[in-house]
C-alpha cells in the first residue's frame, strides 16, 4: 500500500518538486507600488493561515535571477517583453502565467505643460534596457513626436525612428535615473514604479499609456514551478475585490487591474 501511495505522489509531484502547503510562498518584486500591492495580498493570505513572504529587490535584474535560481517562487514586476529579453540574454526558463495589472509608463516634464510645447531639439530621456526602450519609443510615437519604422513596435530601437521632424535629442539613460534628472531634460519617459519612487504623481504625466498597453505587468515563475498550487492560491487571493479597491484607491484609477 505504501509503495502504491509513493508511486501516486511521484506522478502528481515530480522528483525535486516540493510544494508543502505550510511552506511560505516567496514572491519577488521591486520596491514601491508593486511590492505594496503584494504586501496587502500577503496580509489577506496570512489571515487564511497561508504564509506568504514578499521579498523586495532594488535591482530589477536580481528578481529574475532569484526566480531562476529557485530563491523565490513567483514574481510580479515585469512585462512579457522584459521577461523574454532576460530569458534570451541569460538563458532563464521563466514563463508568464497571466497579466496582473497595467502600470502605465508616462511622458513627464519639469519644463513644459504639454507635449505640443516641446521645442525643436528638446532632449528626451528614455530607459536604456531594450524592452523599455521600445515601450518608450512607442509612447513617443503615440504622442505624435516621432514615427517608427513599420513593424518595429515591441522591438523598436533608436535606429527604428523613421521620422523625427523636430529633431528631438532622444537619449538612453538608466531607467532609475530618468525621473531623477527631469530638470536637466526637456522630458522623459518614466515607468510607473520608478516614477512613484522618485516622487512623481502619475496624474502629472503629460501622457500615459492606456489599458490597451502591451506592457502589462505579469505574474511569472520558473517553468517547472508554474503548477505550484500555492501560486494559484495566492493569485486568487490577489484577484479579490479588496486588492482591486486598494489599487484603484491608491492610484486614482491610473493603475488598471487586469482582472
Image (cartoon, rainbow, N blue to C red):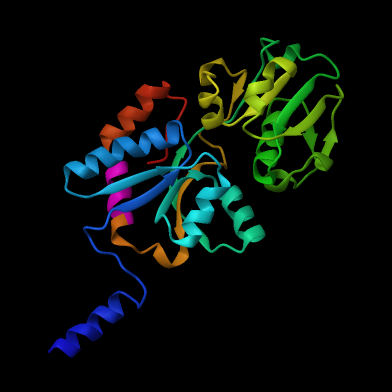
Q: Is residue 138 above or below residue 74?
A: above
Magenta region, residue range: 231-239
Q: Is residue 235 within the magenta segment?
A: yes
Give the x, y percent position of residue 131. Answer: 65, 45
Q: Is residue 69 above or below residue 17?
A: above
Q: Nearer the viewer, residue 79 or 66?
A: 66
Q: Nearer the viewer, residue 149 or 122?
A: 122
Give the x, y percent position of residue 186. Answer: 75, 17
Residue 239 appears in the picture as rendered: no
Quarter the N terminus occupies: bottom left
**Image-based side of 177 in relation to 224, left or right:** right
Q: Nearer the viewer, residue 137 or 165?
A: 137
Give the x, y percent position of residue 229. Answer: 29, 60
**Image-based side of 18 in relation to 102, left or right:** left
Give the x, y percent position of residue 91. Answer: 61, 64
Q: Is residue 178 within the magenta segment?
A: no
Residue at image location 25% in from the left, 38% down from the top: 43
Residue at image location 28% in from the left, 76% down from the top: 12
**Image-based side of 119 in relation to 6, left or right:** right
Residue at image location 51% in from the left, 26% down from the top: 197
Residue 27 appears in the picture as rendered: yes
Quarter the C terminus occupies: top left
Q: Characterize the magenta stretch by its predominant secondary structure.
A: helix
Q: Is residue 106 above or below residue 133?
A: above
Residue at image location 31% in from the left, 42% down from the top: 238
Amino acid at each position: 500500500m505504501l509503495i502504491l501511495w509513493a508511486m501516486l505522489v511521484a506522478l502528481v509531484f515530480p522528483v525535486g518538486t516540493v510544494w508543502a502547503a505550510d511552506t511560505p510562498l516567496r514572491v519577488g518584486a521591486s520596491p514601491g507600488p508593486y511590492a505594496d500591492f503584494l504586501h496587502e495580498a500577503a496580509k489577506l493570505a496570512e489571515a487564511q493561515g497561508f504564509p506568504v513572504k514578499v521579498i523586495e529587490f532594488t535591482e530589477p535584474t536580481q528578481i529574475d535571477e532569484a526566480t531562476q535560481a529557485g530563491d523565490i517562487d513567483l514574481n510580479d514586476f515585469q512585462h512579457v517583453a522584459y521577461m523574454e529579453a532576460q530569458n534570451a540574454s541569460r538563458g532563464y526558463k521563466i514563463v508568464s502565467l497571466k497579466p496582473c495589472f497595467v502600470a502605465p509608463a508616462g511622458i513627464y516634464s519639469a519644463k513644459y505643460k504639454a507635449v505640443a510645447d516641446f521645442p525643436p531639439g528638446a532632449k528626451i530621456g528614455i530607459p536604456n534596457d531594450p524592452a523599455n526602450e521600445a515601450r518608450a519609443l512607442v509612447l513617443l510615437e503615440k504622442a505624435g513626436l516621432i514615427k517608427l519604422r513599420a513593424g518595429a513596435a515591441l522591438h523598436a530601437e533608436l535606429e527604428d525612428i523613421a521620422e523625427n521632424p523636430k529633431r528631438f535629442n532622444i537619449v538612453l539613460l538608466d531607467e532609475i535615473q530618468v525621473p531623477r534628472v527631469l530638470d536637466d531634460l526637456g522630458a522623459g519617459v518614466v515607468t510607473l514604479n520608478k516614477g512613484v519612487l522618485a516622487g512623481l504623481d502619475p496624474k502629472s504625466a503629460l501622457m500615459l499609456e492606456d489599458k490597451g498597453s502591451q506592457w502589462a505587468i505579469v505574474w511569472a515563475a520558473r517553468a517547472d514551478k508554474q503548477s505550484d498550487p500555492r501560486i494559484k492560491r495566492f493569485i486568487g487571493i490577489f484577484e479579490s475585490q479588496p486588492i482591486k479597491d486598494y489599487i484603484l484607491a491608491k492610484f486614482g484609477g491610473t493603475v488598471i487591474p487586469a482582472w
